[in-house]
Amino acid sequence: MIVDTLKKSEVFSVLKDKELKQISTLFEIVKYKNNETVFGEGDPSDKFFILAEGNVKILKHTMMGKDIILEIVSPGDIFGGVAVLDNKPYPATAQAMKSTTVIKIRRQNLLKIMEEYPILKLEIVKYFSDKLRDAHEMLKNIATESVERRIASLLLKLSEKVGVEDSGYKQIAFPLTRQEISEMVGTTVETCIRTMSKFQKKGMIKSSNGRISIKPDSLRRHLET
Protein backbone atom coordinates (compact mmCIF):
# COMPACT_ATOMS: atom_id res chain seq x y z
CA MET A 1 0.00 0.00 0.00
CA ILE A 2 2.78 2.46 0.83
CA VAL A 3 4.46 2.24 -2.58
CA ASP A 4 1.12 2.43 -4.39
CA THR A 5 0.20 5.56 -2.40
CA LEU A 6 3.55 7.18 -3.15
CA LYS A 7 2.96 6.51 -6.85
CA LYS A 8 -0.33 8.44 -6.62
CA SER A 9 1.42 11.44 -5.06
CA GLU A 10 2.39 14.27 -7.41
CA VAL A 11 5.57 14.73 -5.37
CA PHE A 12 6.87 11.18 -4.92
CA SER A 13 5.71 9.73 -8.25
CA VAL A 14 8.82 11.25 -9.90
CA LEU A 15 10.95 8.59 -8.21
CA LYS A 16 11.65 5.19 -9.76
CA ASP A 17 10.05 2.02 -8.40
CA LYS A 18 13.30 0.92 -6.79
CA GLU A 19 13.67 4.28 -5.05
CA LEU A 20 10.06 4.23 -3.85
CA LYS A 21 10.60 0.79 -2.32
CA GLN A 22 13.71 2.06 -0.54
CA ILE A 23 12.00 5.06 1.04
CA SER A 24 8.77 3.15 1.79
CA THR A 25 10.39 1.62 4.88
CA LEU A 26 10.38 5.09 6.47
CA PHE A 27 6.60 5.44 6.18
CA GLU A 28 3.96 4.05 8.51
CA ILE A 29 0.35 3.05 7.70
CA VAL A 30 -2.35 4.40 10.03
CA LYS A 31 -6.13 3.89 9.88
CA TYR A 32 -8.78 6.30 11.18
CA LYS A 33 -12.52 5.92 11.75
CA ASN A 34 -15.15 8.34 10.45
CA ASN A 35 -14.84 11.76 12.17
CA GLU A 36 -11.65 10.72 13.97
CA THR A 37 -9.03 13.48 14.23
CA VAL A 38 -5.75 12.87 12.39
CA PHE A 39 -4.15 15.95 13.95
CA GLY A 40 -5.48 19.02 15.71
CA GLU A 41 -4.94 22.71 15.13
CA GLY A 42 -1.93 23.77 17.24
CA ASP A 43 -0.50 20.24 17.57
CA PRO A 44 3.27 19.83 17.00
CA SER A 45 3.87 19.09 13.31
CA ASP A 46 6.25 16.17 13.45
CA LYS A 47 4.47 14.00 10.84
CA PHE A 48 3.99 14.49 7.08
CA PHE A 49 0.84 12.76 5.78
CA ILE A 50 -0.30 11.35 2.42
CA LEU A 51 -3.83 10.04 2.04
CA ALA A 52 -4.02 6.41 0.87
CA GLU A 53 -7.76 5.62 1.06
CA GLY A 54 -10.88 7.54 2.03
CA ASN A 55 -11.13 11.31 2.47
CA VAL A 56 -9.96 13.87 5.01
CA LYS A 57 -11.30 17.37 5.57
CA ILE A 58 -9.06 20.21 6.74
CA LEU A 59 -10.91 22.41 9.23
CA LYS A 60 -10.21 25.81 10.72
CA HIS A 61 -11.97 26.68 13.98
CA THR A 62 -13.16 30.31 14.12
CA MET A 63 -13.46 32.56 17.17
CA MET A 64 -17.25 32.33 16.73
CA GLY A 65 -17.08 28.61 17.47
CA LYS A 66 -17.76 27.52 13.89
CA ASP A 67 -15.70 25.30 11.58
CA ILE A 68 -14.63 26.33 8.10
CA ILE A 69 -13.66 23.54 5.70
CA LEU A 70 -10.53 24.71 3.91
CA GLU A 71 -9.99 21.62 1.79
CA ILE A 72 -11.13 18.06 1.18
CA VAL A 73 -8.17 15.74 0.71
CA SER A 74 -8.31 12.85 -1.79
CA PRO A 75 -6.08 9.76 -2.20
CA GLY A 76 -2.54 10.74 -3.22
CA ASP A 77 -2.85 14.23 -1.70
CA ILE A 78 -0.42 15.53 0.90
CA PHE A 79 -1.74 17.25 4.01
CA GLY A 80 -0.05 18.87 6.99
CA GLY A 81 2.99 19.34 4.80
CA VAL A 82 3.73 23.06 5.01
CA ALA A 83 3.71 23.03 8.81
CA VAL A 84 6.12 20.08 8.85
CA LEU A 85 8.54 21.82 6.50
CA ASP A 86 8.28 25.06 8.53
CA ASN A 87 8.59 23.11 11.78
CA LYS A 88 5.60 25.03 13.16
CA PRO A 89 2.34 23.73 14.73
CA TYR A 90 -0.39 22.49 12.41
CA PRO A 91 -2.49 25.58 11.48
CA ALA A 92 -5.71 23.58 11.07
CA THR A 93 -7.38 20.31 12.07
CA ALA A 94 -7.47 17.21 9.85
CA GLN A 95 -10.49 14.94 10.33
CA ALA A 96 -11.40 11.67 8.60
CA MET A 97 -14.67 11.86 6.62
CA LYS A 98 -15.12 8.08 6.57
CA SER A 99 -12.96 5.04 7.24
CA THR A 100 -9.62 6.36 6.09
CA THR A 101 -6.06 5.12 5.66
CA VAL A 102 -3.02 7.39 5.56
CA ILE A 103 0.71 6.93 5.34
CA LYS A 104 2.94 9.19 7.40
CA ILE A 105 6.62 9.91 7.81
CA ARG A 106 8.53 11.70 10.55
CA ARG A 107 9.92 15.14 9.73
CA GLN A 108 13.53 14.11 10.23
CA ASN A 109 13.11 11.17 7.83
CA LEU A 110 11.37 13.36 5.25
CA LEU A 111 14.27 15.83 5.32
CA LYS A 112 16.67 12.91 5.00
CA ILE A 113 15.08 11.59 1.79
CA MET A 114 14.82 15.12 0.38
CA GLU A 115 18.58 15.38 0.73
CA GLU A 116 19.05 11.95 -0.83
CA TYR A 117 16.69 12.76 -3.74
CA PRO A 118 16.98 16.52 -4.44
CA ILE A 119 14.28 16.36 -7.17
CA LEU A 120 11.74 16.00 -4.34
CA LYS A 121 12.52 19.55 -3.20
CA LEU A 122 11.46 20.94 -6.57
CA GLU A 123 8.34 18.77 -6.67
CA ILE A 124 7.32 19.88 -3.18
CA VAL A 125 7.72 23.55 -4.15
CA LYS A 126 5.59 22.97 -7.27
CA TYR A 127 2.95 21.08 -5.29
CA PHE A 128 2.52 23.73 -2.61
CA SER A 129 2.65 26.54 -5.18
CA ASP A 130 -0.42 24.96 -6.80
CA LYS A 131 -2.07 24.69 -3.37
CA LEU A 132 -1.38 28.37 -2.70
CA ARG A 133 -2.87 29.31 -6.06
CA ASP A 134 -6.01 27.30 -5.23
CA ALA A 135 -6.28 29.04 -1.85
CA HIS A 136 -5.99 32.48 -3.50
CA GLU A 137 -8.70 31.52 -6.00
CA MET A 138 -10.99 30.37 -3.19
CA LEU A 139 -10.51 33.64 -1.26
CA LYS A 140 -11.15 35.65 -4.42
CA ASN A 141 -14.37 33.74 -5.07
CA ILE A 142 -15.61 34.26 -1.51
CA ALA A 143 -14.88 37.98 -1.75
CA THR A 144 -16.28 38.66 -5.22
CA GLU A 145 -18.66 35.92 -6.40
CA SER A 146 -22.29 35.20 -5.51
CA VAL A 147 -23.16 32.19 -3.37
CA GLU A 148 -24.65 30.40 -6.41
CA ARG A 149 -21.45 30.80 -8.38
CA ARG A 150 -19.30 29.73 -5.42
CA ILE A 151 -21.32 26.54 -4.92
CA ALA A 152 -21.35 25.77 -8.65
CA SER A 153 -17.57 26.28 -8.84
CA LEU A 154 -16.99 24.04 -5.81
CA LEU A 155 -19.14 21.21 -7.18
CA LEU A 156 -17.40 21.41 -10.55
CA LYS A 157 -13.97 21.33 -8.93
CA LEU A 158 -14.85 18.31 -6.78
CA SER A 159 -16.37 16.46 -9.75
CA GLU A 160 -13.19 17.05 -11.76
CA LYS A 161 -11.00 15.83 -8.92
CA VAL A 162 -12.96 12.86 -7.55
CA GLY A 163 -15.97 12.44 -9.87
CA VAL A 164 -17.15 9.07 -11.17
CA GLU A 165 -19.58 8.50 -14.05
CA ASP A 166 -23.23 8.14 -13.00
CA SER A 167 -25.73 7.81 -15.88
CA GLY A 168 -24.91 11.08 -17.58
CA TYR A 169 -23.90 12.77 -14.33
CA LYS A 170 -20.62 12.85 -12.42
CA GLN A 171 -20.96 11.68 -8.84
CA ILE A 172 -18.68 13.17 -6.18
CA ALA A 173 -17.02 10.09 -4.73
CA PHE A 174 -17.79 10.75 -1.07
CA PRO A 175 -20.81 11.89 0.98
CA LEU A 176 -21.07 15.67 1.26
CA THR A 177 -23.62 17.43 3.47
CA ARG A 178 -25.16 20.86 2.94
CA GLN A 179 -23.40 21.90 6.15
CA GLU A 180 -20.01 20.94 4.72
CA ILE A 181 -20.70 22.73 1.42
CA SER A 182 -21.76 25.89 3.27
CA GLU A 183 -18.56 25.79 5.33
CA MET A 184 -16.43 25.46 2.20
CA VAL A 185 -17.98 28.41 0.36
CA GLY A 186 -18.56 30.71 3.33
CA THR A 187 -22.35 30.89 3.54
CA THR A 188 -25.20 29.72 5.78
CA VAL A 189 -26.68 26.22 5.66
CA GLU A 190 -30.09 27.70 4.81
CA THR A 191 -28.72 29.58 1.78
CA CYS A 192 -26.86 26.46 0.66
CA ILE A 193 -30.04 24.34 0.90
CA ARG A 194 -32.00 26.88 -1.20
CA THR A 195 -29.26 27.05 -3.82
CA MET A 196 -28.87 23.28 -4.07
CA SER A 197 -32.66 22.89 -4.38
CA LYS A 198 -32.63 25.41 -7.23
CA PHE A 199 -29.85 23.50 -9.01
CA GLN A 200 -31.74 20.23 -8.50
CA LYS A 201 -34.99 21.63 -9.96
CA LYS A 202 -33.05 22.74 -13.03
CA GLY A 203 -31.59 19.23 -13.45
CA MET A 204 -28.00 20.42 -12.87
CA ILE A 205 -27.51 18.15 -9.84
CA LYS A 206 -29.15 15.21 -8.12
CA SER A 207 -28.68 13.60 -4.70
CA SER A 208 -28.97 10.00 -3.58
CA ASN A 209 -27.90 8.38 -0.30
CA GLY A 210 -25.91 11.47 0.67
CA ARG A 211 -23.98 11.47 -2.63
CA ILE A 212 -24.20 14.44 -4.98
CA SER A 213 -24.06 13.97 -8.75
CA ILE A 214 -23.71 16.90 -11.11
CA LYS A 215 -24.01 17.66 -14.81
CA PRO A 216 -20.70 19.44 -15.47
CA ASP A 217 -21.77 21.05 -18.76
CA SER A 218 -24.94 22.47 -17.18
CA LEU A 219 -23.01 23.96 -14.26
CA ARG A 220 -20.38 25.40 -16.62
CA ARG A 221 -23.12 27.06 -18.71
CA HIS A 222 -24.61 28.44 -15.50
CA LEU A 223 -21.25 29.97 -14.59
CA GLU A 224 -20.93 31.53 -18.04
CA THR A 225 -24.24 33.40 -17.81
Image (tube, rainbow, N blue to C red):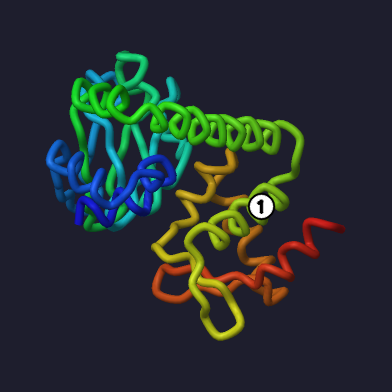
Where, quadrant-wise, is the C terminus in this rendering?
A: bottom right
Residue in the image at 33% along x and 30% along y: 117
Q: Which residue is mark 1?
A: 153
Residue 48 position within the rendered picture, expressed as x and y whole percent measured from the top left: 27, 32
**Residue 205, quarter of the rendered image:** bottom right
**Residue 84, quarter of the rendered image:** top left
Residue in the image at 71% along x and 64% along y: 219
Residue 183 position within the rendered picture, expressed as x and y whole percent measured from the top left: 50, 42
Of 48 and 121, the residue lying toward us:
121
**Circle 1: is it few (<14), some (14-19), or many (20+) Cα within 10 Å?**
some
Q: The disc labelled 1 sits on which kind of residue?
A: Ser
Residue 16 position within the rendered picture, expressed as x and y whole percent measured from the top left: 32, 48
Looking at the image, residue 122 lies above or below residue 103? above
Q: Circle 1 sits in a helix, a strand or a loop, which is it?
A: helix
Looking at the image, residue 163 lies above or below residue 166? above
* View extreme (bottom): residue: 167
Looking at the image, residue 57 lies above or below residue 192? above
Of 78 and 217, the residue lying toward us:
78
Residue in the image at 23% along x and 38% along y: 38
Tell me if 58 is positioned left or right of 98 in this view: right
Residue 145 position within the rendered picture, expressed as x and y whole percent measured from the top left: 75, 41
Residue in the image at 60% along x and 51% along y: 154
